[in-house]
Amino acid sequence: MRASSSIGTGRPRSPEVDAAILDAALALFIEGGLSAVSFEQITQRSGVSRTAIYRRWSSREEILARALGHLCEEAEATFADWAERPISEVMDWFVENVPRQMLNPLYRGLSRSVLALGEKSELKAIYSEAVLRPRRAAFSNMIRRARATGALPSSLDPELIQDMLIGALLHQILLEPADQTEEQLRDYIIRLLTGLGLLQK
């Protein structure tokens, strides 16, 4: 991510101000997509001056990439070192937590807004480089370690498995009815992970 770190030697940045900016930008993005996000709109929504915003980030794409990254960090906070855990623990956490996130209107709206970004979107490029690629690499390494110890079949392709998993979850979020229950989604995820070979019967 290219968020500015050269704030100078003056007063330290306020975490509360940072959070207000990120929350405002994310809300605008979910409500109306990238076109709804501007420094002026962020200022109005957050109550933070444009000068203070520019002092922290130089573009709306950088602000949104940081906001999306922060959202991912919050979602994983209860399992911060998941990349180093045994695959069985990670899958148990996945089964327990992901259905709840999939029913969260914020995540559902966010998924639609991210997928609506253009192929050459700067935000998509920044978010992919700063957030998605590191997580994908960590997940792939976790699968390779599990294969090496015999916890997963040696034939599992980490990249292909992730593509299939993400595709299936997005299908549920974007195309299936929104009135599914948490238990219905949990049952689906158990069947999905079992079918992909990530969850042992």
Image: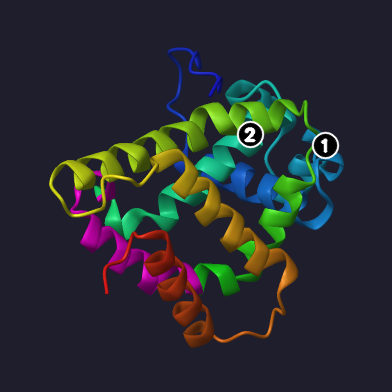
Instruction: Report the residue marked by disc 2.
Output: 63
Specify the quadrant of the image occupied by residue 34: top right
Q: Residues within 10 Å of mark 1 (few under 14, many from 20)?
A: few
Q: Secondary structure at mark 1?
A: helix
Residue 192: image x %, image y %? 46, 68
The answer to whether marks 1 and 2 mark residues whose Cβ atoms lie closer than 8 Å is no
- Percent x, y of residue 52: 64, 29
Q: Is residue 84 magenta?
A: yes
Magenta segment boundaries in residue numbering: 82-99
**Residue occupying image coordinates x 29% and y 37%:** 141
Pick the residue in front: 3 or 196: 196
For the point 70% across and 25% down, the residue is 51
Residue at 31% from the left image edge and 66% from the top image edge = 199
Decide: is 161 above or below 89: above
Which color mode does the image show? rainbow
Q: Quadrant of the C terminus?
A: bottom left
Q: Which residue has dot 1 on it?
A: 40
* 33 left or right of 186 in image: right
Instruction: Look at the image and tell me whether residue 138 can be seen.
Output: yes
Mark found first going from the N terminus, 1 or 2: 1
- The residue at 74%/68% (across/down) is 175
- Front position in the image: 67 or 142: 142
Number of numbered tags placed on the structure image: 2
Mark toward the viewer: 1 or 2: 2
Question: For the residue marked with disc 2, what is the amino acid?
Answer: Ile
Q: Is residue 173 magenta?
A: no
